Image: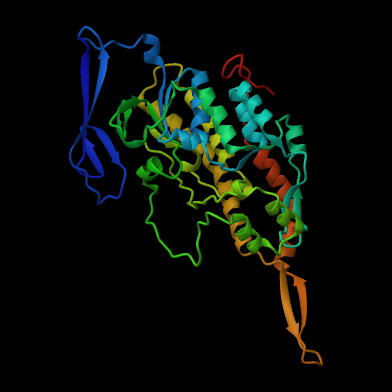
Amino acid sequence: MASVQILCACTSSSKVQQQGSIRYRYGYPSEKMNGRRCSVRVEGGNGMVVPSSEEEKRKLRVLVAGGGIGGLVFALAAKHKGYAVKVFEKDLSAVRGEGRHRGPIQLLSSALAVLEAIDQSVAWKIKEAGCVTANRTNGLADGLSGEWFGEFDLLTPASKKRLPLTLVICRITLQDILVNAVGPNILRNKSKVVDFIQEPSKVRVMLENGEQHEGDILIGADGIWFVRNSLGAKKQITQMLAMERCNVSAGKKKRLLDLFGNWCNEVIALISETPENMILQRDIYDRDMINTWGIDRVTLLGDAAHPMQPNLGQGGCMAIEDSYQLILELDKIAKHDPDESEVISALRRYEKKRIPRVKVLHTASRMASKMLVNYQPYIEFKFWPLSENAINIQIKHPGIQVAEALFKFTFPQFVSWMMAGHGYQFLQNFFNPLSCFSY
């Protein structure tokens, strides 16, 4: 006869202390939740629960909420390290992007080097499917005049440090490669994390379908949603009325040409030559970076900790770097059965090492967004000399001239640090002999 274990969870408020465990629940503090949730799990036969092998007991058990780029890269690395990892994704079709075009994503040299260190086969597939941009002219240009505001070199810093070259790749293709590499035994579809409980010896997650899973660590990689909000990053939402319609289902190309018709020829040509079905509206969620990424056995990575605007193309790259740093810290404790303090210390070390670099890039990305909104290349003067007709004179805005000078001397160094300044030394055999990358 198989034994049946019934797991029940009760709550009466959003945060409850119960017998030494901490219960976090999604939602505002005023929300109430009554009733009892149970899940039934068959453990074994002959009326006994089948114990795990000694090898299984020693494996570090890691639960990941979210199957985006950061969650998948971490899961792939954890798989190679031999951890018992589970990834819970609420909608795998959204990850794979079936039936939808989700645009490209840029992978800088730093992120590609991490992927090569984790799995050379996966990195090779990504490079085969991508388009190298490091050997092209890169920089910021004035969309109205077409003049270069400033150029930067993505090729030289990568070559000097023997890093792979920056490329762009279709986001769907990238995530499809990662999903296939992680495998269905790790990635669980239709598994939305709705709750979790921390205890001294473990963390337990509750799924929307009633299942419960236990692990040593919970990683929030679900973007700006559940785990981030449960750790106190939720803010009051302000709703505002837009001056015009935001969702335009038809005539997207015409609308873009109306908006950007007076821009330079390159921009107009780009819009004109893009098929209507390839024009995509992507909503941008702007969030402040939080300075506390975790509590006890829970931590965050990627957009869950530092959602970035797309100006510098660093959102996915920083999530990949986060995953690698976290693996480095967990590897220090995974070779033995770590106690609670060791697990917590490893997570806090990861956060401490990642926050400074990410904060600089998050700030730079936000500053770039504000510059775009307030961009004014010229100042216009009108005067009437001896006639009734006004004469218009335009001069370049002094702020733009100062910015160009600063850009010329400082931005190349910043770009070099951004793409190759992560400080990682990829050691031979760090993951396994068949998937490593050395310098």
Q: Where on the picture, by quarter, is residue 64?
A: top left
Residue furthest to the front in view is: 250
Which residue occupies 45% across, 20% down? 83
Residue situated in front as seen by the camera: 290 or 226: 226
In the image, farthest residue toward the left: 35
- Quadrant in which the N terminus is drawn: top left
Quadrant where the C terminus sits is: top right
Residue 402 shows in the view: yes
Q: Specify the farthest residue to the right.
A: 386
Q: Residue 161 occupies which quadrant of the picture?
A: top right
Residue appearing at x 38%, y 42% in the figure: 226
Residue at horizontal 18%, vertical 42%? 34
Q: Is residue 51 above or below residue 200?
A: above
Q: Position of residue 220 (x, y in %)?
A: 42, 36
In the image, is 269 to the left or to the right of 302?
Answer: right
Q: Position of residue 420 (x, y in %)?
A: 67, 36
Q: Position of residue 162 (x, y in %)?
A: 73, 29
Q: Give the residue at x 72% y 59%.
A: 142
Q: Is residue 361 above or below residue 83?
A: below
